């Protein structure tokens, strides 16, 4: 028999009572049934429905209608906040600072009021970790600690050797194996979830974004930038040391550098049969910059969901802040890459009670500490996030969950410690060298601090917080020195996203959006700690560790807008279809604008400002090789040095001899060169008239010519060639 249940809110007929009425009883065969009771009736049974007439809607009905309209109103208000933020950033960019600040205040107020999203679980309790039996865990842990002790004891003299590398690797592997979670992966269920249309679309978008990020990092990499600076020459000397068998733990040249980049570059050189040159450095750092992107997706999905993760990954794929630094061949992208993976795995491990994710976070923390110095501040950010998360659990009475999280986090910390053992031993032997670079910026080790340190730090903090909207890093080598670190669109989205993250955490009691914003702000502090050299702040490279978290904050605004409209359509299907399509089109337009603006920043504006300032060692090397190709020995070619001009080692890289020795400085050294009657070749700065006069005095029949730079105007240099016989 068919079973029916009278609806609680039925649509009345055209001649029936007004809307808002509800069914209170159904009468059949003289019996009455309440709406909550199912009616088991044969087909054709006559039923009389009793509906009381109500001219006014019930208060709960009004509340329901207001609730239905709330997401739509909030979406409209949030869209207005994004539009106002864009207008404010445009005003700031045109020098209208007060107007921009006023508009920003209105935008922030609207974003805070409107920001809301469906309840997202801050904590997803997982089953207890399935670890090895206690006796196995004990013996593997003892073996790991013993091997770690051997590795620490034998990592003397600043060298990697088999006697310390093997026990070091054994310690890391044994400790991870002792405390890993061995729950069996449900591959079938994972494949089933992946096969859904929504997940396949997400995967396709992610692959497309990763391809876009690869294009921004690898296209025209040989030409943009073309010429290196002295820092890259120093790095190639370090790479040369490794290739020559000098396996340093810490590279002391040029105030000291951690080892990650050099062994990574050497591995790529061996793997792809590369020359040890500027291109090898750039390929290595560009690849590291690209490897950051999947971690940003994982972090964004844990914090704000898939929509925000896709947008954040796209922004990170193209943002000039991260792309230019990754293309430059120095260690700068090592910090954001390591921060992204450490933070993503830390958040995932705490939120999902995943022991393996936390152990992996510890491993990445150990790797990051051997990369770029700015990563060291994760030693502050990571424990602070853990402490706040434990407090959140305890406030909700989850003492057992807090204890499990603390234990897993401590194990991750021990694994990070084991991962850095050789570097720790070097720091034990030479703490002055390991911390020298940081000390020169934080203290008066290199120059006196120009004022009150506390006031300098506060001023630095203000400048670094404004570096995305109003202030600029003046260093040109891996940056656009005439504009903020973010473009107009990302700068506006950052402000709206920061307000939205704080509002979401307050309304939903989900701490992760606010903690992600906090992590981004904390990782700006390495730039603000330039107390002795405040003119070096803000620094896009020292603040690079903030990039992963802040890209997620930038994506928060558009993601919240889409979530609000999705909620409105879910409550009233069809009512907000046009608004949803309009919002989606707006988000797509903003994303395309970010891609287009940063394409110009990376491939047009950056090389245009870089070329006139950079050393044109490639042009000098081309002239030298052409002279050598005419049958002259390289030993009779000389580089005449000049202050703030070309680095002879950079020329040496281009000719395949980084230690090219024939360099003189000043007219006295020029006059002392003895060619033994052979033809000679000299290259000079066009402003070095005393050295040119000394050459003419020594070789009166010599000929000079002005060689223009091949890449941009204003980079000409002088080539002076002598004739046979010393004339």
Image (spheres, rainbow, N blue to C red):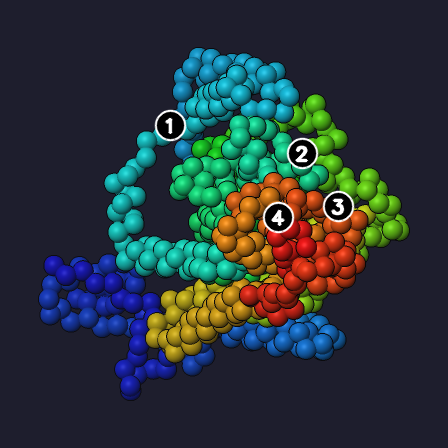
Residue 368: percent from left, percent from top: 57, 38
Quadrant where the image shows the N terminus: bottom left
Instruction: Please name the residue shown 63% across and 31% down the image.
Output: 250
Q: CA distance from mark 2 to mark 3?
A: 33 Å
Q: Position of residue 95 (x, y in %)?
A: 72, 76
Q: Which of the numbered marks, if any, corresponds to residue 252?
A: 2
Q: CA distance from mark 4 to mark 2?
A: 40 Å
For disc 3, the marked residue is 672
How much space separates mark 1 and mark 2, taking CA atoms?
42 Å
Q: Which residue is mark 1?
A: 182
- Horizontally, residue 495 falls left or right of residue 597, namely right
If you read the primary sequence from the N terminus, does the residue marked by circle 1 or circle 2 appear first? Answer: 1
Decide: is 615 above or below 712: above
Q: Mark 2: few, some, or many residues within 10 Å (few <14, many ≥20)?
A: some
Residue at mark 4: 678
Q: Residue at x 61, y 40 (%)?
A: 659
- Is mark 3 in CB contact (under 8 Å) with mark 4? no
Secondary structure type for disc 1: loop
Label 4 neighbourhood size at 10 Å, few (<14), some (14-19), many (20+)?
some
N-terminal-most mark, 4 or 2: 2
Q: Nearer the viewer, mark 1 or mark 2?
A: 2
- The mark lying in front, picked from 1 and 4, is 4
Per the model, the C-alpha gap separating discs 1 and 4 is: 74 Å
């Amino acid at each position: 028999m068919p079973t029916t249940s009278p609806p609680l809110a039925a649509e009345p007929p055209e001649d029936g009572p007004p809307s808002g009425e509800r069914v209170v009883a159904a009468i059949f065969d003289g019996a009455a049934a309440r709406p909550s009771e199912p009616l088991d009736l044969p087909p054709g049974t006559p039923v009389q429905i009793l509906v009381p007439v109500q001219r006014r809607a019930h208060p709960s009905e009004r509340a329901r209608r207001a609730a239905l309209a709330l997401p739509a109103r909030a979406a409209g208000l949030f869209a207005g906040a994004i539009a106002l933020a864009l207008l404010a950033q445009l005003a700031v960019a045109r020098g209208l600072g007060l107007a921009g600040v006023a508009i920003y205040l209105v935008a922030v107020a609207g974003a805070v009021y409107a920001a809301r999203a469906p309840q997202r679980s801050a904590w997803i309790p997982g089953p207890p970790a399935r670890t090895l039996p206690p006796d196995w865990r004990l013996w593997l842990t003892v073996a790991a600690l013993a091997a770690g002790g051997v590795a620490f004891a034998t990592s003397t003299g600043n060298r990697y050797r088999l006697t310390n590398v093997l026990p070091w690797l054994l310690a890391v592997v044994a400790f991870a194996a002792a405390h890993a979670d061995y729950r069996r992966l449900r591959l079938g269920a994972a494949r089933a979830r992946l096969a859904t249309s929504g997940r396949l679309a997400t995967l396709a978008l992610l692959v497309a974004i990763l391809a876009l990020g690869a294009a921004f990092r690898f296209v025209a990499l040989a030409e943009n930038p073309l010429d290196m600076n002295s820092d890259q020459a120093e790095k190639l000397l370090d790479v040369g040391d490794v290739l020559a068998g000098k396996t340093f733990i810490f590279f002391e040249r040029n105030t000291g550098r951690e080892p990650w980049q050099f062994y990574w570059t050497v591995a790529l050189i061996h793997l792809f049969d590369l020359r040890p040159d500027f291109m090898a450095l750039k390929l290595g750092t560009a690849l590291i910059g690209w490897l950051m992107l999947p971690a940003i997706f994982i972090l964004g999905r844990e914090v704000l969901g898939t929509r925000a993760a896709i947008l954040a990954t796209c922004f990170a794929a193209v943002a000039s802040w991260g792309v230019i630094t990754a293309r430059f061949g120095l260690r700068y992208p090592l910090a954001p890459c390591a921060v992204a993976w450490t933070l993503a795995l830390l958040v995932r491990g705490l939120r999902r009670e995943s022991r393996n994710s936390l152990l992996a976070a510890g491993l990445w923390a150990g790797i990051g500490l051997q990369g770029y110095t700015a990563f060291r501040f994760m030693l502050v950010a990571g424990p602070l996030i853990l402490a706040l998360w434990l407090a959140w659990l305890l406030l909700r009475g989850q003492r057992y969950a807090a204890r499990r999280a603390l234990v897993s986090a401590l194990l991750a910390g021990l694994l990070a410690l084991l991962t850095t053992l050789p570097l720790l031993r070097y720091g034990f032997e030479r703490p002055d060298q390991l911390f020298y670079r940081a000390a020169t910026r934080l203290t008066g080790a290199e120059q006196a601090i120009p004022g009150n340190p506390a006031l300098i730090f506060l001023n630095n903090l203000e400048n670094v917080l404004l570096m995305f909207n109003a202030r600029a890093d003046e260093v040109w080598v891996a940056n656009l020195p005439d504009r903020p670190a973010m473009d107009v669109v990302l700068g506006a989205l950052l402000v709206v996203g920061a307000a939205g993250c704080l509002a979401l955490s307050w309304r939903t009691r989900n701490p992760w959006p606010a903690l992600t914003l906090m992590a981004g702000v904390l990782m700006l502090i390495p730039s603000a700690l330039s107390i002795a050299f405040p003119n070096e702040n803000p620094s896009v490279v020292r603040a690079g560790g903030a990039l992963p978290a802040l890209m997620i904050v930038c994506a928060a605004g558009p993601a919240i807008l889409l979530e609000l409209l999705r909620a409105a359509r879910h409550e009233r299907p069809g009512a907000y279809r046009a608004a949803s399509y309009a919002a989606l089109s707006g988000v797509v337009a903003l994303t395309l604008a970010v891609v287009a603006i940063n394409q110009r920043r990376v491939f047009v504006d950056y090389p245009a400002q870089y070329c006139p300032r950079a050393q044109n060692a490639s042009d000098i090397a081309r002239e030298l090789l052409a002279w050598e190709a005419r049958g002259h020995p390289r030993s009779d070619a000389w580089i005449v040095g000049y202050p703030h001009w070309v680095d002879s080692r950079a020329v040496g890289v281009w000719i395949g001899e980084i230690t090219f020795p024939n360099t003189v400085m000043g007219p006295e050294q020029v006059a002392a060169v003895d060619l033994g009657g052979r033809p000679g070749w000299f290259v000079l700065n066009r402003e070095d008239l005393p050295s040119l006069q000394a050459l003419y005095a020594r070789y009166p029949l010599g000929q000079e010519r002005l060689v223009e730079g091949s890449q941009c105007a204003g980079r000409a240099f002088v080539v002076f060639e002598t004739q046979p016989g010393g004339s």
